[in-house]
Image: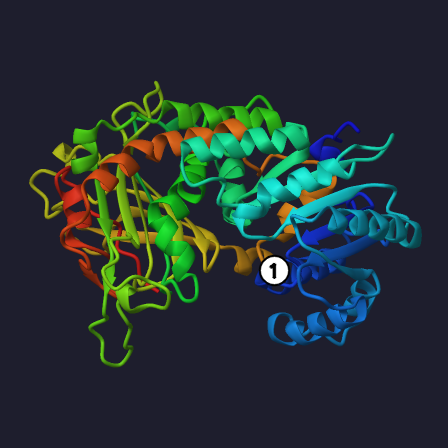
Amino acid sequence: MARRKTEERRGQPADPCTLVIFGASGDLGKRKLFPALLNLKRGGLLRDELAVVGLATSEMTSEAFRERLTEDLRTFAPEDVDSDLWKWLAGRVSYTPGNFRSPEAYERLAEALKAAGEAHGTGGNVLFYLATPPEFFGDIADGIHAAGLAAEPPGSWRRLIIEKPFGHDHDSARELNARLRRAFEERQIYRIDHYLGKETVQNLMVFRFANGIFEPIWNRRYIDHVQITVAETVGVEQRGRYYEQAGALRDMVPNHLLQLLALTAMEPPSSFEAESVRDEKGKVLRAIQPLTPEEVLVRTVRGQYGPGTDPAHPAAAYRAESRVAPDSNTETYVALRLGVDNWRWADVPFYLRTGKRLPCQHTEVSIAFRRPPHRLFEGTEVGVMTPNVLVLHMQPDEGISLSFQAKVPGPVVRTGNVEMDFNYADYFGRTPSTGYETLLYDCMCGDATLFQRADSVEDGWSVVAPILDVWKALPPRTFPNYPAGSWGPREADELLARDGRAWRHITD
């Protein structure tokens, strides 16, 4: 079924469909997916021809599953539990127990899909959402295909959504892609990166390409460097087992941070259609200069948090966390200096950092412009010319800020830094959001713009492959090397200081 153009369907209810959630009894469903469905319905973006089928290993009836969801929503969407919205959605929810690797589970699923389609008029459209651990991705795709459920009936569609991680290195990502494409066509596969559901992330393209004052200066002639920060205050919580295998580099860089880099650095696409946008993002990832082993040693920093130093807010060291080895060498912090080898960005460094147990939760892209020449102000009291900085804030508060120089009132020529701030909530109000509304809606509409294509997944892993190799060969000797609640190891500051730069100071 041909995908409708984005501009033709925006603001219209999504297609009728049955949403199948594998792993429906897990955290993602109750925290994000069901609240997101309620928000979409509240916004008039879901049709009545919707059904939700949950499939998980827990043995329970549909009624018991709905009761559990109702109790869960008292925590995660309390204002909706007793509303007509939830009654509407709950009446469309059913549950099927099954082992993800058992053919019988897919036979029962086929029966559930038939019943849901007949009861709610979903037209044979099915969206399979894999809210499961990644080791089940391939098995579930195989099971769906073997049961004939991936085939698209005439006039209907079938789509598969998977969450990161998309493999744990380049080879495993390529193997996963090959396995998924044996079961589904690439156009049917939607690889979700929930960071791309953030309003400001999407607005990055609009900001650049819909405003004539910014795109002409979005290049090496005017931009000194770019900083991308994804900071978290939490530790690994109950994810110690997963994190011991992944670490901050695998967990965050090939997907979240490189997607933000690609959106920041991409060339103008020929249109906002999915393939045009994804083509340009892919070109950026392939243009990132590969790091040699020697460059890995000087352009990358890894860290692991130790115990906090603030007695008022005690925090355990990573090695003391649940399911973490007491001598673990897994990194919880990463800082990188990357370059994009093309005409627009030659010699402009991109500094990326992400970590756990940092002082505040914050995600941003910071564009630092080149300093103007000081010659005009010689003989005045104007000292250092502070560069202009454009910051796109993505969480927790979404907005855009711009700093520039202005004259301090008075007879003496002195300058001061001025901040212009735009906050989404101030201009457009706050709307309930889990970050998954746009992604679910786009999947139901067949718009793949915000989703990763197979080649981009593999290109992202290619960027970090040399780093993984060097770090594996040379275990860290100084872990833990930053206290919980700080901005990371001193080596991260030195990474920029060697270039005469510093990380942007971020406060709550």
Q: Is residue 455 left or right of residue 464?
A: right
Residue 211 to residue 327: above or below: above
Secondary element at tag 1: helix
The residue at 83%/53% (across/down) is: 112
For the C terminus, give its image quadrant: bottom left
Pointer 1 local density, CA inside 10 Å: few below 14, some 14–19, many at least 20: some
Residue 52 to residue 388: above or below: below
Of residues 250 and 57, the one nearer the viewer is: 57
Q: Position of residue 305 (x, y in %)?
A: 25, 61
Q: How is the image coloured?
A: rainbow
Q: Position of residue 504 (x, y in %)?
A: 26, 50
Query: Please, what is the three-letter code of the amino acid marked with disc 1?
Result: Lys
Q: Quadrant of residue 139?
A: top right
- The residue sitting at the bottom extreme is 312
- The residue sitting at the right extreme is 118
Q: Position of residue 453 (x, y in %)?
A: 55, 31
Residue, disc 1: 32
For the N terminus, give its image quadrant: top right
